[in-house]
Amino acid sequence: MNIIAEKYVKLVLDIGKYDPDFVDAYYGPPEWKPVEQNLTSDSAAHVMLSAEVDTLLSELESLASYKASELETLRYRYLYKQLLACKMKVEMLNGITFSFDTETKTLYDVTAPSFSDTHFEKIIDELDKILPGSGNVSERMELFKKNFVIPGENLERVFNAAINECRRRTLEHIYIPESENFKVEYVKNQPWGAYNWYKGNYFSTIQVNTDLPVYIDRAIDLAAHEGYPGHHVYNSLLEWNLANKRGWKEFTIYALFSPQSLIAEGTANYGIKMIFPGNERIKFEKEVLFPLAGLDSSEAEKYYKVIDLQDKLSYAGTEAARKYLDGRMNRLQTVEWLVRYALRTKESADKYVSFIEKYRSYVINYSLGNDLVEAWINSSGGTEQNEEKRWQLFEQLLSTPQTPGGLTKR
């Protein structure tokens, strides 16, 4: 399987020549990295890449009867699902389009649940009852949340405090190589809110986009999701446990449009609850982050009730992407739909559609990933009453080859 793994890495690098977003991270042998980049896919490239994928799938299938350990079986399934995603990506580079659900099933090994507009309207009705004022709920939401924007001059110190606390709490439960570290950069003009660029050797660059207002609750969200115990820890543990200790080369590369991303985004989102169970997050934010940001915490309790309800609208983003990519709404209609049903500002909705245009069905990985990870941990015994087991299972997801389909089999 090591030979197949090496070929897989080179295949992902080859696909990345035609889509620079496909290779999210690579820290394998530098001589494997192609010199040519940003090429335009043509029929010759399609034939070549398709043949490479099919050959690797056949080689993997020939190993199906091999009596493997549990970890080796996980590795086999991981590589197989990753290759299926590569196969679809090659087809997409050749101009072939798929329905939203077909795309997500092959790229991310899951089909996202579908929700009617009525589902979101019921949640919005609850928000209507607790938001100050009357009239348009989206406008009232925007007005209410303005009081909780971190002033630009305080953003860095608030974020640093959030990072330090997230790291401290993570290290109480998970060992990370001592040399691990990351740097934070503040950027503009990006379709995402934040991004972790993993460089290898347990080091990341985390970029925070400041195009839109950064609300006080986003400090913990971003610090945990991008850093501890999220993407930075996930990538570091895969490199340490699988790439370095076992020499499994497939874990020296991260193919963005693949099942691995649902595991990555799901654990990063769920990790927030892992390090701040119960009311611990609100307590820390009120006592530490609000003062650092220079914000009044007198309405903090109401703010968190509003945020909790808004979080229940998270699948509105998935529905918007499904409708837009399936051609049932145009860009303007999608922006308006997000303003109405996700209660985003027009600027935020426009930014979200830009994300969909760049990353397509990738948007499913956040909400659905979180829910699948939470369900798997709970069903495996990692309940709130058994914190030690919970952390053990969470670390297992971060340290071993996992597939979304594997999380749904229990």
Image (tube, helix red, strand yellow):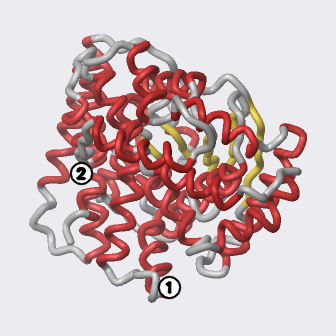
- Nearest to N terminus: mark 2 or mark 1: 2
Label 2 Cα crowd, 10 Å radius (few <14 / some 14-19 / many 20+): some
Q: Which quadrant of the view contains residue 221?
A: bottom right
* Image: 61 above or below 33: below
Viewer-nearest residue: 406 or 279: 279
Which kind of residue does numbered mark 1 sit on?
Answer: Glu
Question: What residue occupies the far front of the structure in this picture?
Answer: 134
Rendering coords of residue 279 (x, y %): 61, 73
Label 1 Cα crowd, 10 Å radius (few <14 / some 14-19 / many 20+): some
The residue where tag 1 is placed is 387
Residue 7 appears in the figure: no
Residue 270 appears in the figure: yes
Secondary structure at badge 2 equals helix
* Image: 6 above or below 54: below
Rendering coords of residue 194 (x, y %): 63, 40
The residue where tag 2 is placed is 80
Rendering coords of residue 375 (x, y %): 33, 68
For residue 168, side relative to residue 160 (left or right) = left
Viewer-nearest residue: 41 or 229: 229
Secondary structure at badge 1 equals helix
Q: In which quarter of the image is the C terminus?
A: bottom left
Q: Which quadrant of the view contains residue 140?
A: top right
Question: What residue occupies the far left of the structure in this picture?
Answer: 65
Question: Disc 2 vs disc 1: Cβ atoms closer than 8 Å?
Answer: no
Give the mark toward the camera: 2 or 1.
1
